[in-house]
Image (cartoon, helix red, strand yellow):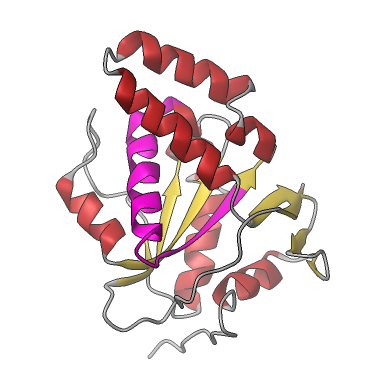
Amino acid sequence: MELVTSNGASSSSSSFTHRSKNFDVFLSFRGEDTRLGFTSHLYGALDKMGIRTFIDDKLPRGEQISDELLKTIESSTSSIIIFSKNYASSSWCLDELVKILECKKNGQLVRPIFYDVDPSEVRNQREKFGEALAKHEEKFKDGKKVKRWREALHDAASLSGWHYKNEYVFSDYSRSFTSFDGFVMLCAMLNNNTQPKKKR
């Protein structure tokens, strides 16, 4: 597997260490795809580096996203969206995504990771993403909700991020890492050469 950068917008002026926020990073992911693998490893590595990272493995799940989780997204300096094959099958994940992009307009740094999916599948809702949205349209009679999800997927997949393949390559492909630790270090130094904090 390799991680290469998708093309997209430039980074915002936010940094991982903004003191007024409760969390440096909010992780949005589909649990059944990556919780026990990529996402848990990423969370552990960021936490080890002293980066306050939120992972929603203890909040109760339901059809609608909770107010508590919405507030957590708002109180995070940045968000990393881990797009995987079944991400769009979860209305919870899609509601998270919409909220994250709303926060981006207020300066939150947002980066997508395309884990075993092509960015074009997310952006244009093809393959598993297209199938999931079609099912949502059948289930939800609120066409505006599904339209917001489609727009959010398109916009998020157009951001600069990482495509996971065999190694980790960022931006103009000038930075390449063959280790997971190298990738995590890059995550921590995304913006303004921010240095990871040391845990006390």
- Vertical side of 148 occupied by 184: above or below: below
As drawn, is 186 to the left or to the right of 156?
right
Total residue callouts = 0
Specify whether residue 8 is painted magenta: no
Q: Residue at x 49, y 65 (%)?
A: 44
Viewer-nearest residue: 2 or 140: 140
Looking at the rendering, the stretch of residues picked out in magenta corresponds to 89-113
Residue 26 in view (yes/no): yes
Farthest residue, direction top: 138
Q: Residue at x 80, y 51 (%)?
A: 166
- Where is residue 4 shown, x and y percent of the image? 75, 54
- Where is residue 61 shown, x and y percent of the image? 25, 36
Residue 116 in view (yes/no): no
Which quarter of the figure is the C terminus placed in? bottom left
Occupied quadrant, residue 190: bottom right
- Vertical side of 190 occupied by 178: above or below: above
Q: Residue at x 54, y 85 (%)?
A: 194
- Where is residue 20 shown, x and y percent of the image? 26, 80
